[in-house]
Structure formats: structure tokens, C-alpha cells
Image: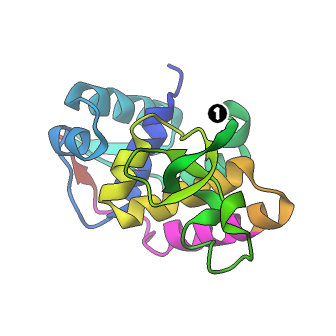
């Protein structure tokens, strides 16, 4: 069972809101995917060790495994591609939390092409086609996706800073368990 990019989007959505319990329908709606796609994503995440399912309909991300995968694997499995300058949603070092940590010319900061975006810059392919839409609706998810993009496309300094911030974001909620997520 091969992981798909939307699996990471599902995992990050749940990781961004640890006390919340999610149904597949709610996850699908929040991420602009179907409930069956959300269910399949969870199954693949559990099979790969990025999530655990202690009981029927109960699952949660395994934050240390998710962090390791994002730090060391994602940029090789799903590399980011850059494109022409367009209007879009800021990402990587053009979005929080990195934009306040680094000095980058605004026209050099990457964006996901999107008609309602607030910035202009070189386009960067999102981890999944619905990520920009989901990020616009959820600032916590946007932060994680921006850090992920910095890990995928950044230079050594940006990747190091993104890695430290990603670890802080993910592990601050890790108490051995997320409390599960209802996925019925």
C-alpha cells in the first residue's frame, strides 16, 4: 500500500487540531476531498506506521514518525516543483512561522497559485491539489503546510529552521497519544 500526498494532508489536518475528533466526512469537507478518500488515507497512514488505530473508528497520527518522515523523506518522494510568478497563497518561507524569522524579498517568496491569494511570487506545487483551499480555511494547517514546503524546497538554513519549528509544532501536543480521532 503506497502512501499518497493526500495522506499527509489528512495527517497534518488532524495533527494541527489534536483535541478535536474527526469523522471521515468532516475531514473530507475540511480538505475538499471525499469521505472515502479520507478513509483510504487513514488506512494507508496506519499501514505505513504514520498513524495508529487502537480501536474501530479511533485513530491518531504517530507524531515522532510523522516528523521523521517529513524531515527525511517527503522532499524525495513528493518533490516540490517551482513555476512562474503568479498570484497565490504564501507558503514555505513566505508564510508564518518562517516569514517573521527570515529576510526574503516578497517577490521571491513562493506561493501556491490560487485566484484568491494575497501575494505574488514564484509558484510552488502544493503537496496536494486541495492544500491551498484547506490552508486558507485553517491557519494552523497552513503553518504546518508552509513548514513542510520549506522542508521540500528550502536551502539548508531554511530547512534547518523549518525542521526545528515543525518539531516544536508537532511535538508540543505529543503526550504519547492524541486522544484519538473519531473517524466513523
Q: Is residue 156 above or below residue 165?
A: above
Q: Is residue 56 left or right of residue 115?
A: left
Which is more toward the observer, 133 or 160? 133
The image shows residue 16 at horizontal and vertical percentages of: 39, 62
Say how the picture is coloured. rainbow
* Residue 177 is one of the magenta-drawn residues: yes
x, y (%) of residue 133? 35, 46
Query: Is residue 4 among what the camera can see?
Result: yes
Q: Is residue 44 left or right of residue 23?
A: right
What residue is rendered at 34% in x and 49% in y? 134
Give the residue at x 45% y 61%. Answer: 118
* Residue to which mark 1 is pinned: 78
Near-viewer residue (54 or 17): 17
Q: How many marks?
A: 1
Give the farthest residue toward the right.
Answer: 156
Label 1: which secondary element: loop
Q: Furthest residue to the top?
A: 1
Vertically, is 168 above or below 118? below
Percent x, y of residue 25: 16, 38
Residue 10: horizontal and vertical position, in percent?
38, 43
- Badge 1: residue crowd in 10 Å (few <14, some 14–19, many ≥20): some
State left or right for residue 157 relative to residue 8.
right
User: In the image, what residue occupies the spot 24% across and 25% down?
Assistant: 36
The answer to whether residue 177 is seen in the rendering is no
- Start-end of magenta stretch: 161-179
Image quadrant where residue 154 sits: bottom right
Q: Is residue 36 magenta?
A: no
Left or right, residue 158 beside residue 137: right
The residue shown at (46%, 30%) is 47
Q: Dividing the image into 4 quarters, which one contains the C terminus?
A: top left
Amino acid at each position: 500500500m503506497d502512501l499518497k500526498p493526500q495522506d499527509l494532508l489528512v495527517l497534518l489536518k488532524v495533527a494541527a487540531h489534536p483535541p478535536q475528533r474527526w469523522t471521515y466526512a468532516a475531514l473530507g469537507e475540511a480538505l475538499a476531498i471525499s469521505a472515502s478518500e479520507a478513509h483510504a488515507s487513514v488506512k494507508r497512514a496506519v499501514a505505513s506506521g504514520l498513524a495508529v488505530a487502537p480501536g474501530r473508528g479511533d485513530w491518531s497520527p504517530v507524531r515522532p514518525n510523522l516528523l521523521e518522515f517529513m524531515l527525511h523523506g517527503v522532499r524525495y518522494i513528493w518533490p516540490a516543483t517551482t513555476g512562474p510568478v503568479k498570484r497565490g497563497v504564501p507558503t514555505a518561507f513566505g508564510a508564518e512561522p518562517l516569514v517573521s524569522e527570515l529576510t526574503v524579498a516578497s517577490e521571491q517568496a513562493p506561493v501556491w497559485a490560487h485566484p484568491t491569494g494575497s501575494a505574488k511570487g514564484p509558484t510552488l506545487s502544493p503537496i496536494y491539489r486541495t492544500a491551498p483551499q484547506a490552508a486558507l480555511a485553517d491557519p494552523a494547517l497552513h503553518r504546518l503546510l508552509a513548514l513542510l514546503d520549506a522542508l521540500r524546497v528550502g536551502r539548508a538554513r531554511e530547512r534547518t529552521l523549518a525542521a526545528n519549528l515543525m518539531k516544536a509544532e508537532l511535538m508540543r501536543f505529543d503526550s504519547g497519544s492524541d486522544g484519538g480521532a473519531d473517524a466513523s
